Amino acid sequence: MAGLRLGPLLRHVDWETGTGATVWVEADRPCEAEVRCADGAGGTARTWRIAGHHYALIPVAGLRPGRETAYRVLLDGEQVWPLPDSPFPDSTIRTPAPGTDSPGPAPVRVAFGSCRWAAPPSDASHDPVGPDALDTLAQALARAPELPRPDVLVLLGDQVYADETSAETRAWLAERRDLSEPPGEQVADYEEYTRLYYESWLDPEVRWLLSTVPSCMIFDDHDVIDDWNTSEAWQRRMRATPWWRERILSGLMSYWVHQHLGNLSPAELAADPLYAEVRAAEDGTEALREFAARADADPAYTRWSYRRDFGRTRLLMVDTRAARVLEEGRRAMLTDKELIWVREQAMDGLGGASGFPGPGPEGPGAPGPEEPGVRGGYDHLLLGTSLPWLLPHFVHDVETWNASVCGGRRGGRWARIGEDLRQRGDLEHWAAFPESFDALTDTIAAVGGAPGAPATINVLSGDVHHAYVATPDWSRWPSRPPRSQVRQLTCSPVHNSIYASIRLGFRFGWSAAGRALGRVFKRHGRVPHSHLSWHKTGGPWFGNQLMTLTLQGRSAHLRLDQAQSDPAGGGARLVAALETDWTG
């Protein structure tokens, strides 16, 4: 009898028709995987094999729009989910009701965060890094099913930590190989990556949550290694390391299996030649390995970014790791092809010209005059980028200084000093790629200034182990400023340590003194003047936390919840640290 090793994960729910979904599972042997819904909907899929593991992404058809139905998972006809004696409610699939957005559109709730170190506490009564925000959300929803449930959970990177393993995983690794040999206590191959996903997704609360709330995911550095693709020098050093090739190929392969495929719609899956090849093969390992090797060698070879539309809310998840161009003098966060794709997806359905602003008010593609009454194809744009666009001012200025000196603006000696600091100090956010920062800013301005512009543009980010809200100031922008309300919303970690140095460093980064010192760095680096400034309008908050955006009509409501131990006992609870609204 086949058994369920991992899952189920409810991934894609069709917001266009409200009739379909996909469910991801891993079985312990080849089998026929099936989803049966209480309302008669369902679907089947044969498992496919990667490195001795058996997976299926089950398409569910026949769902009823605007309904919620419980479902079961069967392998070769035998029920394997829900688990016997489960303390959680039935896993359900909730579908939207398309075509009912006016009047009185239903809200879209998007919960997001990043950086979840999944290691279980050695003492069940005390977690040294505090309550897990995903666990706490799951407990709240399980105890009170009437609570508003997210329509989608957006996980913005560091779903697993390949370079920071738990004590339990280190003990398991030690049974496989000699940990005195590199990469030591870090994971080395595909099998060891699967261990990380088991540790993360077999957590009972998280397992149930991911089975009943659809999820969108993207990687960040720790899914592969800290500061992945920082620079050309970093990449050369890593590629010269004997264990690196197996690590990067395994990281990309496991990401494709566990995270990437579930991000795609059934139509996108049907058009994916690699997915077809893997499913048709007796063993798809070599095909996937060859794909991963090409993706690592050429950032333009594949696209990890993707688009999801939730009614009149559009989510663009942007790959800010594998799509980088690292050659000094050509450094970019995104390849030209990737940047064009992001711009096209953001502009799709809006009125007016599809071009983008140039260096001045009359630049090519500058947005035309405002056209009252023009309603575009969507009301809210969410740009999911694991790395924040707008950083604390001191951090941003140091990273732009560093990019300038590494590029040779202060000579060879400073370039060498700058490269050493870049790798030691994690100086590799959008600000460390100044032309890409400007290109993203131009894109946001163009979308927000187009006829039929969305009411809000929200950049969703994590990575930096604190939460904050930042608002750009367009008063010095050389062309027409966006009409959309634009916000940088940063939320991390979901579950990780918050050291005192992090708290002090980021508080200083936002301070007036930090801003003044940042200007000194910019002068030294001969950094060109920027037309964009911004200010912090919320935070910083430290702790394990999640943000939730509720989008309805042309309005947005933001709530930040922190996971805190319940002083009355009974586990943890989510406590609101911020609630705020804005309207476009």
Image: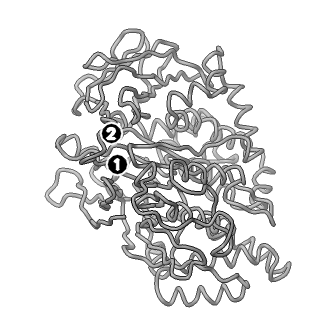
Please give the residue where the numbered disc 1 appears in the rendered image: 134
* Any part of residue 423 in sight: no
Q: Split into 4 quadrants, where in the image is the N terminus?
A: top left
In three-dimensional space, the C-alpha distance between marks 2 and 1, rounded to whole angstroms, equals 8 Å
Residue type at numbered disc 2: Leu
Q: Is residue 517 above or below residue 29?
A: below
Residue at image point 33% right, 64% down? 583
SS for dot 1: helix
Residue 80: quadrant of the picture = top left
Q: Nearer the viewer, residue 336 or 448?
A: 448
Residue at image point 32% right, 36% down? 96
Residue 301: quadrant of the picture = top right
Q: Is residue 231 above or below residue 434?
A: above
Tag 1: Cα neighbours inside 10 Å, few (<14), some, or many (≥20)? many
Q: How is the image coloured?
A: one colour
Please give the residue where the numbered disc 2 appears in the rendered image: 209
Residue type at numbered disc 1: Leu
Residue at image point 84% right, 81% down? 411
Q: Position of residue 336 (x, y in %)?
A: 72, 54
